[in-house]
Image (spheres, coloured by chain):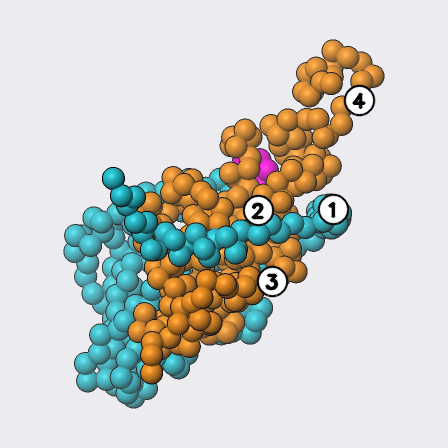
Chain colours: A orange, B cyan
Amino acid sequence: MPNRIGDAAAVPGSPISVHDRSDPDLVAAAARGNVDAFAELSRRYRDTYSRFAVRMVGDRDEAEDVMQSAFIRAYRAMDQCRDPNRFGAWLYQIVANECRSWVIRRNRRGRRIVRDEIQLRDAPAVLSGDGDETLEDVQYALQQLDADQREAFLMKHVEQLSYEEMAEITGDGISALKMRVKRACARLRLLLEEVHDA
Amino acid sequence: MPERPRDPDDLFAERVARVLGRPESFGDDFETSLVAAIRADRPIRFRLVPRARRFSRAWWKTPASIRISPIAATLLLAAGVAALAVVGTLQSNRRGVTDPYSVATTAPVHDTVTLVRFVFVGRAKSVSLVGDFNRWGAEPVPLIGANGVWTASIPLPNGRHEYAFIVDGAHWTLDPLAPSSSDEFDTKSSIVTVGT
């Protein structure tokens, strides 16, 4: 089964399904306005980023909206994808930016002010630290982090990216990313472990 | 040789990550809606918040003159007002962040930054500056106060920036001398435009 346009040209009448095309071929086709080619790219990659989006946004339906917005942006900027062989990484940048912006704007709406560790320490713990946290409880704690820390923690510990990969996606320095992960862990721990004895 | 105990932070992170690592996926309706939205050329719902840019360390070494706008000088005599003054233009060597996606959606990046002085006049125990340039409070800029006059100077690139003052840690306060805008959630902020 041919998987490149060139191969198809040598086999007249042989239809090529979008499912069999390589990423670079689909990127090129989408950049020329082929929506079906982009839809195939979406099918290949959306599950890769859906968990990240749901955890960042905190709500599945909202996350799906945010992912849709991100993918629409990606389609409209397809000619900016400089390395079609790394379409996935390029798309991840867009998804991460969209999720992060959504979080920041939602926090602005609530006039949420990120305070220092002292205020966080005084906040009630979500539950006791018995190691049996539910997804809802952990998700709640995650929502208390600011966008940068939340993103860094998810990329590092949930999506298992290296700091180099995170730097490429976020455009931030590795030192800053390490600090964000460290602070995110500290904040999550405060929220998920027992409060100090009275 | 006894096994080296693992870092408690790593163990904690692993425990949390196990919970958060449960798969999530959207159905094939995702592509159906996506294709329909693209073909209908629907507007993108959210406006992006740009990431904070990194500046060269050299910017602070360049001396800058200070000038106060006439309006700010007059209003500094009144109580409970805030004023904004542009103090100088510095050249900086900015390390650009390669982001092919942002090229499509933002204005071109320039190599000029302006030191902008924010002034708040009023009675308060603390005043902080938050805006799109510091992720709206992720790293609030504390203003230094003396005799009811609070100031802070920060470098900003050319362009439009949104900001607000946080007074006494709780009161979201706009700059009465600056234009304001509301986002789609009706949250108001003040606007400063730097450069041309």
User: Crowdedness of circle 1 by 10 Å Cα count: few (<14), some, many (20+)?
Assistant: few
What is the CA distance from the residue labelled 3 to the residue labelled 2?
A: 14 Å
Letter of the chain that mark 4 sits on in the rendering: A
User: Residue B78, relative to residue A72: is it above or below?
Assistant: below
Circles 3 and 4: CB distance less than 8 Å?
Answer: no
Q: Which residue in the protein does label 4 denote? A: A15
Letter of the chain that mark 3 sits on in the rendering: A
What is the CA distance from the residue labelled 3 to the residue labelled 4?
A: 41 Å
Give the number of the disc on residue A49.
2
Q: Nearer the viewer, residue A191 or B122?
A: A191
Amino acid on which the number 3 mark rests in the picture? Asp
Amino acid on which the number 1 mark rests in the picture? Asp
What is the CA distance from the residue labelled 3 to the residue labelled 1?
A: 19 Å
Residue at point 50% right, 74% down?
Answer: A110
Query: Do marks 3 and 2 both belong to one polypeptide chain?
Result: yes
Q: Which residue in the protein does label 1 denote? A: B28
Amino acid on which the number 4 mark rests in the picture? Pro
Circles 4 and 1: CB distance less than 8 Å?
Answer: no
What is the CA distance from the residue labelled 4 to the residue labelled 1?
A: 23 Å
Letter of the chain that mark 2 sits on in the rendering: A
The image quadrant that residue A33 belongs to is top right
Nearest to N terminus: mark 4 or mark 2: 4
What is the CA distance from the residue labelled 4 to the residue labelled 2?
A: 31 Å
Query: Can you tell which of label 4 and label 2 is closer to the viewer?
Result: 2
Q: Which residues are magenta?
A: A76-81
Residue B190 visible within the image: no
Nearest to N terminus: mark 3 or mark 2: 2
Query: Do marks 4 and 2 both belong to one polypeptide chain?
Result: yes
User: Crowdedness of circle 3 by 10 Å Cα count: few (<14), some, many (20+)?
Assistant: few
Secondary structure found at label 3: loop
Q: Quadrant of the C terminus of chain A?
A: bottom left
